[in-house]
Structure formats: structure tokens, C-alpha cells
Image: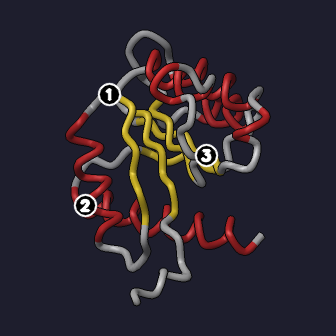
Amino acid sequence: MKQASAVSPARVLVIEDNSSDVFLLQRAMNQQDFLFELTHLADGGEALAFIRREGAYADAPIPDLILVDLNLSKYNGEDILREIHETKHLARALVCAWSSSQSRRDRTRLMDLGVAQFVTKPAGLDQFLEIGKLIKDLLAGHAAA
């Protein structure tokens, strides 16, 4: 008889319209020693359907961590973050924003929307590897809380 694993994978939702960034992020997370399931939504419309539990997302599991790109098609990341912030069933999810923007004003505004961490979008693979570690550490700290 096969034993069930005592550790369930962390559920990570990435809302990002650049598939190359998602690929690199997944590779970076694979370099870390933790189990995760990554769900990728490619635009703001899909993200809103997920958040509102509409259509194909009606029974979607609640993510442990949500990473939102600020520059999305259809709806911008701030719209998505506002919707997440106002949604009760996502209240326990750790929410992070990522962008190539270095604006302090952006960061302050996002913290008001419940963003736990602002992640600067990396320019190369080495920086992506650092983000993989950051996500692992965030999830570990969130699970311990």
C-alpha cells in the first residue's frame, strides 16, 4: 500500500501575460527544494474569472501565494489586486506584485491593497533564481504563521 505524502504542495497562482517570464519563474522555483503546483493565468480577464470562481474556475483550489504582474492585458494588475483584496475566500492567500517598475509610489499604493511583497521583475536567469528562493521563503514563513 502506498503511503500518502504528509506534505502537500504549495499552490502558486501566477497572473502574467509573458509566457517566457512564467517559464523562467517555474525553472527558478524548480531549483528550490519544495513541492509546488503552479497555475498560470495569462490575462486579467482569466484572473477575474478565477477570483470570482466563475466558469472553469468554480471549484479551483485556493492558492497559497498569488503573484500578479502589474502590466496585464484587458485589466491591469492593480485592478486584479483590488479584486483579490475584496474577496473573502482569498483572504489567507499571500499576495505579491511583480513588475519592472521601480516606483516607490507604486509600491506604497500596492501595500494599501494588501500586497505582502513587491518583487522587481528580473532581467536575467540569476535574478529569477533569487525569486525562486524568495517565493520558497515567503511560503515557508506564511505556513508557519
Quarter placement of the C terminus: bottom right
Q: CA distance from mark 2 to mark 3?
A: 23 Å
Please identify the residue farthest to the top as the structure is shown: 74
Amino acid type of disc 3? Ile
Q: Decide: few, some or many residues near mark 1? Use Cα within 10 Å; few <14, some 14-19, many ≥20.
A: some
Q: Which residue is mark 2?
A: 27
Question: Which of the colour schemes (rainbow, by chain, secondary structure, one colour) is used?
Answer: secondary structure
Say left or right for 143 vs 23.
right
Residue at (67% x, 30% y) in the render: 84
**Does residue 80 appear to the left or right of 102 in the view shown?**
right
Please tell me which residue is depicted at 40% across the width and 44% down the height of the picture. 39
Residue placed most toward the observer, 129 or 44: 44
Instruction: Label 2: state its secondary structure.
Output: helix
Q: CA distance from mark 1 to mark 3?
A: 21 Å
Identify residue type, mark 2: Arg
- How many neighbours does mark 3 have within 10 angstroms: few (below 14), some (14-19), or many (20 or more)? some
Residue drawn at the location 47% of the way across and 44% of the way down: 13
Residue bearing the label numbered 1: 17
Q: Nearer the viewer, residue 35 or 136?
A: 35
Dot 3: element: loop
Q: CA distance from mark 1 to mark 2?
A: 17 Å
Residue closest to the eye, 130 or 136: 136
Query: Is 34 drawn above or below residue 134 in the view shown?
Result: below
Verify CB contact (< 8 Å) between mark 1 and mark 2. no
Q: Which residue is mark 3?
A: 62
If you read the primary sequence from the N terminus, does the residue marked by circle 1 or circle 3 appear first? 1
Q: Examine the image and state in which quarter residue 126 appears.
A: bottom left
* Residue 6 in picture, x, y percent from top left: 55, 82
Mark closer to the observer (1, 3): 3
